[in-house]
Image (cartoon, rainbow, N blue to C red):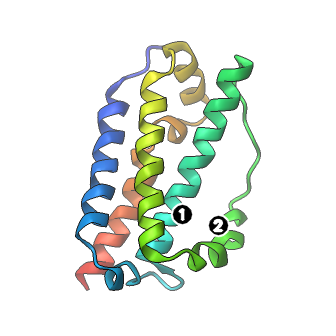
Amino acid sequence: MTLDRSFIERNHASTDRIRALVTRLSDKELQYPVGRHWTVAIALAHLAFWDRRVINILEKTKRSGKLFTPEIDIVVNDISLPFWAAIPPREAARIALETAEALDERLASLPSALLEEIYGHNERWVLRALHRSEHLAKIDAALKK
């Protein structure tokens, strides 16, 4: 299988959306509710957390030369919520953007064979735009209310 390298542009586009969002929002807007328990800042901290998870996977995969697949349950979101809420909103925005940029660079520079193996295991680890876009759409919708 040859991996479609359009993931690079799609990831960059989602990072650009994060950049545009964090650049234009005030500190007050970063605290705007997104859903029942989340705020814009919490959603951004969430994105940074999961992007950092993929960075960790990529580093361990690259070092060992074989796919590293950690087991993390969905309950991590619920467990992490109070920690993400404690992050100052502007800091959550900074971390989300910085992490997305770092991950985009790492993914773009990985050898194709390794990327294809990672993608075959979990496409969302390569095409980060899928996860980012879900949350950015929720943020956009919440801010329009």
Say which element carries label 2: helix
Q: Which percent across, then down, holds residue 115?
A: 53, 23
What is the quadrant of the C terminus in the image? bottom left
Q: Nearer the viewer, mark 1 or mark 2?
A: 1
**What residue is rendered at 61% in x and 32% in y?**
58
Count neighbours of disc 1 (C-alpha within 10 A) and say few if under 14, some if 14 to 19, many if 20 or more. Answer: many
- Does 49 appear above or below 105? below
Residue 119 placement (x, y as % from top left): 54, 29
Work out whether residue 25 or residue 46 is closer to the camera in this orientation and state it: 25
- Residue drawn at (26%, 64%) of the image: 23
**x and y percentages locating residue 116 in the rendered image:** 53, 21
Disc 2 target residue: 77
Q: Earlier in the sequence, mark 1 or mark 2?
A: 1
Residue 57, x across and y down, in percent: 65, 36
The image shows residue 132, relative to residue 101, as above or below, that is below
In-image side of 113 versus 22 (left or right): right
> What's the CA distance linking mark 1 and mark 2?
8 Å
95 on left or right of 133: right
Category of crowding for the residue at label 2, using alpha-carbon neighbours closer than 10 angstroms: few (below 14), some (14–19), many (at least 20): few
Q: The residue under label 2 is which amino acid type?
A: Asn
Q: Are marks 1 and 2 in contact (CB under 8 Å)?
A: yes
Query: Which residue is identified by label 1?
Result: 46
Q: What amino acid is found at the position of numbered circle 1 in the picture? A: His
Report the side of 133 relative to 69 (left or right): left
Q: Residue at x 41, y 74 (%)?
A: 40
Q: Quadrant of residue 139?
A: bottom left
Left or right of residue 80, residue 28 in this image: left
